[in-house]
Amino acid sequence: EPEVTQTPSHQVTQMGQEVILRCVPISNHLYFYWYRQILGQKVEFLVSFYNNEISEKSEIFDDQFSVERPDGSNFTLKIRSTKLEDSAMYFCASSDVGGPMNTEAFFGQGTRLTVV
Amino acid sequence: AQTVTQSQPEMSVQEAETVTLSCTYDTSESDYYLFWYKQPPSRQMILVIRQEAYKQQNATENRFSVNFQKAAKSFSLKISDSQLGDAAMYFCAYRSPLGTYKYIFGTGTRLKVLA
């Protein structure tokens, strides 16, 4: 069964460093998402990406965040200068065509980011 | 904007018993999708069950079923014959069929299963 794959599963980084979280969505999917879950809290939407551009972003997704689909298969989330409060689980998700045929997104297993 | 509310931060159930987790939501849309996700300690998001709003019949997946009350904007999850492996965090989620199709999650309910 196709699945969304995220790497690494756990990343530890120094405050102020840049990190790139990687995701390989399901191959025929068109919509890509990043979500964040701070420990003990709910899952929050960060950004959606469609047709090679951001289609929606939340207020959390400020200038230190960026997303990219560099090669048609990977989907990355970059955090330019990490802060302690960026420590969280980051989930990538993808879904196929939109409209009434689209029912669900498929989530990756998550990347746990720890900023020290 | 849509919102999802889970009013039970924590629930407990005896093994083999039945438990119901509550979820309410607010939306002005008539068609949408609702989901329950299970998050075990590994923190992976596992789809438990989904419901299309245009379907009147409540969804069922083995021991898991929902009570979908569209007019009341209520979407509860019933777990029958609870097992130790059901212990996890459960999130209710809303997805619009329009726009970017993003999910909006509730705050979650931690389910404990007592042996």
Image: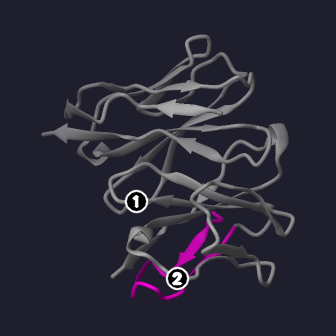
Q: Is residue A113 magenta?
A: no
The reply, left or right, for residue B71 in relation to residue A81 is right
Q: Residue at x 62, y 18 (%)?
A: B57
> Quadrant location of the N terminus of chain A?
bottom right
Q: Which is nearer the N-term, disc 2 or disc 1?
A: 1
Q: Amino acid at mark 2?
A: Ser
Structural distance between the alpha carbons of marks 2 and 1: 18 Å
Q: Which residue is mark 2?
A: A81
Place residue B40 in its image quadrant: bottom left
Q: Secondary structure at mark 2?
A: loop
Task: Tell me if mark 2 has few (under 14), some (14-19) or many (20+) residues whose alpha carbon lies within 10 angstroms of its own.
Answer: some
Q: Which residues are magenta?
A: A1-25
* Marker disc for residue A38: 1
Return the residue found at the far right: A51
Q: Secondary structure at mark 1?
A: loop
Q: Position of residue B91 (x, y in %)?
A: 44, 41
Q: Residue at x 40, y 59 (%)?
A: A38
Q: Amino acid at mark 1?
A: Ile
Return the residue found at the far left: B115
The reply, left or right, for residue A52 in relation to residue B82 is right
Residue A21 vertical position relative to residue A85 in the rendered view, above or below: below
Q: Residue at x 32, y 53 (%)?
A: A40
Q: Which label sits in the foreground, 2 or 1?
A: 2
Asked which colour scheme the image uses, the reply is one colour
Q: Position of residue A75 (x, y in %)?
A: 69, 75
Place residue A85 in its image quadrant: bottom left
